[in-house]
Amino acid sequence: MTGATNFTTGQLLGTVLAVQANFYQVQLDQEFGEMGKQDSSHPPMLLCTRRTRLKKIGQQVMVGDRVVIEEPDWSGGRGAIADVLPRQTQLDRPPIANVNQIMLVFAVADPPLEPYQLSRFLVKAESTSLDVVLCLNKSDLISPKIQQEISDRLVGWGYQPIFISVKNCINIDHLSKYLNHKTTVIAGPSGVGKSSLINSLVPNVNLRVGEVSGKLARGRHTTRHVELFELPSQGLLADTPGFNQPDLDCTPEELVYYFPEARARLAVASCRFSDCLHREEPDCAVRGDWERYPHYLQFLDEAIAYQTQRNQQADPESNLKLKTKGKGQTQYEPKLESKKYRRVSRKTQLQALQDLYQDSEE
Ligand code: GDP
Ligand code: ZN
């Protein structure tokens, strides 16, 4: 057996689909027979260890990593990871390498679509700088007219939502075209039909569905346990329980770029001040009559709180903080608001912890 040898490098290459303790489940690339023709048999999956050399240099192996395999034991289904190819992207929470895009799944009803929550997920997804696919499930529960209204509204936000119904099998084929040959992370609140969708996209996987059992099935996943599912179209799909209540931990300055409709405004005009935070500053190109501007202001407060907290951790002695004033000037002020910010941040953190705890306990 020739295995999945790469013809140009002579190396055996594969993708890490799951990590458990010190073992890595590696899906080898498509096999090629003697004549260079694609072998029709399914490419083998090997249970691999990490070479001591990699441990010594501190090279971690993540789900999604492209790896070089040595000494395959075909009959025993074992191998050793000798090298990790450079990562194109790296998500830390959940830990996955080489992700191409994020697919956000929300429901149009049951649970109702909450614009603020959706906005939060969108901003978090944008902050990864990966492509974002917005998928709205349970379209069977609403009329075409309501669907059109939701669509128009989200187009105003800069997105083209894909309406699906897992239950009635509407638009699933259309959606899967977006997933071909890509590694996609699926995220969204619970109860929107993510498990149902994965079941319908991935053959031979059987995630438990339903408000209670769905969460039970998810219980074995923690933020550390991530698994990639293979799609028939060569794509890979990851479920992400750790992404349920995203914290906004970007800097106040970059936040605006995570709103496509604000990016569009900045593409055709600029603010007078280069450090404009788009609040009350004069001649601001961003501030204005767009639907999510109030979301922007609210997330901005959160981003400032996060930054304040980070600065305090870096310099706990300092009792002054740099404050951006309305006219684009900055000045140092006593940290009057820091207590409030700190409290908010702790609360947010606690909330995130509780969410995680619930995720792993349920
Ligand atoms: P998850 O928590 O996001 O993984 O959601 P689940 O896949 O567990 O689904 C939650 C509930 O929504 C279950 O009762 C599903 O049967 C139901 N559901 C999933 N997809 C659809 C759909 O397209 N239409 C309707 N009406 N219900 C759906
Ligand atoms: Zn501005």
Image (cartoon, rainbow, N blue to C red):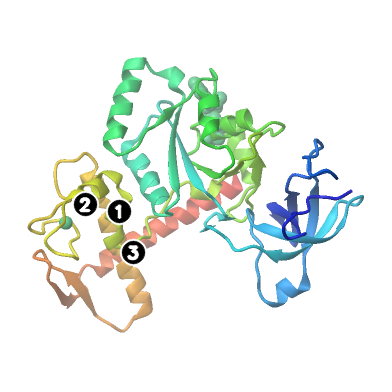
Residue at the image point whose x is 71% and y is 72% from the top? 54
Q: Earlier in the sequence, mark 1 or mark 3?
A: 1
70 is higher (above) or lower (below) than 330: above
Looking at the image, do the residues carrying marks 1 and 2 touch, with CB atoms under 8 Å apart? Answer: yes
Where is the C terminus found, in terms of image quarters? top right
Inspect the image, locate mark 3, and give the three-letter code of the amino acid beneath it.
Tyr
Residue visible at 12% across and 71% down in the picture: 329
Along the line of sight, which residue is nearer the eye, 101 or 292? Answer: 101
For the point 66% across and 34% down, the residue is: 232
Q: Nearer the viewer, mark 1 or mark 2?
A: 2
Q: Which residue is drawn at the image coordinates 65% and 48% (left, top)?
A: 227
Instruction: From the image, tell me which residue sits under label 1.
Output: 257
Above or below, comparing residue 58 to residue 95 in the picture: below
Q: Amino acid at mark 2?
A: Leu
Q: Is residue 303 left or right of residue 87?
A: left
Q: Residue pushed farthest right? A: 75
Q: Percent x, y for residue 92?
A: 53, 59
Compared across the picture, whether 177 is left or right of 36 comes to left
Front-most of residues 312 and 132 = 132
Q: Position of residue 294 (x, y in %)?
A: 21, 45
Q: Which residue is mark 3?
A: 306
Residue to which mark 2 is pinned: 266
User: Callout 1: helix, strand or loop?
Assistant: helix
| Relative image position of residue 233 (x, y in whole percent) | 63, 35
Tell me, yes or no, whether the two marked residues, 3 and 2, touch with CB atoms within 8 Å: no
Instruction: Give me the C-alpha separation between circle 3 and circle 2.
Output: 25 Å
Marks 1/3: CA distance? 17 Å
Distance from Cα at disc 1 to Cα at disc 2: 9 Å
Dot 3 or dot 2: first in sequence order is 2
If the picture is divided into quarters, which one holds ligand 2? bottom left
Say whether residue 109 is left or right of residue 37: left
Task: Give the amino acid type for the residue marked by disc 1 in the picture.
Answer: Tyr
